[in-house]
Image (tube, rainbow, N blue to C red):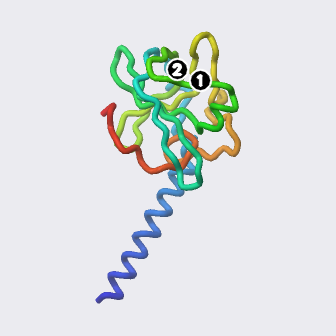
Amino acid sequence: MTRQFTTRGVALMLWLGASAALLAQSGSLTYDRTEEVTVSGTILHVVSLAAPDGAVAVHLDFKTSDGMLNVHVAPAMFIGQENFWFFADDRLEIVGVKTFIDGNNAFIARSLKKDGKTLTLRGADGKPAWKPATEGVDGCGVAHALLPRGTEL
């Protein structure tokens, strides 16, 4: 009986691991250029999420006239290499795709414009500009734990 439960537990863990790996590999598939929109607004919070490998993902809690968006940006290292930065209360124009990730409304950014300067995060095909092109599980470029809050539900 105990052996049967152990076998089922191991099978469940393997299935969950495989599902997470497939989701991580399919991140770029969630970016559909035909669904692209441009939004303008103000950053409420700049959120960094660390992965076990030390990489840091950047997300923005972004207030628009239509409500809150959780913007999935890119790895912090890539943003810094492009000599770009974000602060609360910055006004931005963001081009990207609205989607649904981790039970929350989300926005995967392709480019951000601040003070006349543009940061391009993805090519016309939606593939990330950073190397290596590992997108993590939510399109921001870092395989971090799920977002700990749902400010934009």
User: In whole angstroms, how far apart are the C-alphas of marks 1 and 2?
Assistant: 6 Å
- Residue at the spot 51% in from the left edge and 39% down from the top edge: 30
**Viewport quadrant of the C terminus:** top left
Against 139, residue 3 (above or below) is: below
Q: Which residue is at the front of the view, 121 or 28?
A: 121
Label 2: state its secondary structure.
Answer: strand
Q: Position of residue 60 (x, y in %)?
A: 46, 29
Residue 4 location, quadrant: bottom left
User: What amino acid does circle 2 point to?
Assistant: Ile
Residue 140 location, quadrant: top right
Label 1: state its secondary structure.
Answer: strand
Against 112, residue 32 (above or below) is: below
- Residue at the spot 54% in from the left edge and 44% down from the top edge: 27
Q: Position of residue 51 (x, y in %)?
A: 53, 50
**Viewport quadrant of the N terminus:** bottom left
Q: Position of residue 87 (x, y in %)?
A: 50, 23
Q: Which residue is mark 2?
A: 94
Residue 33 location, quadrant: top right
- Residue at the spot 56% in from the left edge and 45% down from the top edge: 142
Mark 1 packing: few (<14 Cα in 10 Å), some, or many (20+)?
Answer: some
Mark number, residue 111: 1
Mark number, residue 123: none
User: What amino acid does circle 1 point to?
Assistant: Ser
Q: Residue 108 vs residue 129: left or right?
A: left
Q: Which residue is at the front of the view, 66 or 59?
A: 59
- Residue at the spot 36% in from the left edge and 44% down from the top edge: 148
Give the mark, 1 or 2, whose residue is nearer the N terminus: 2
Cβ–Cβ under 8 Å for marks 1 and 2: yes
Q: Position of residue 90 (x, y in %)?
A: 49, 17
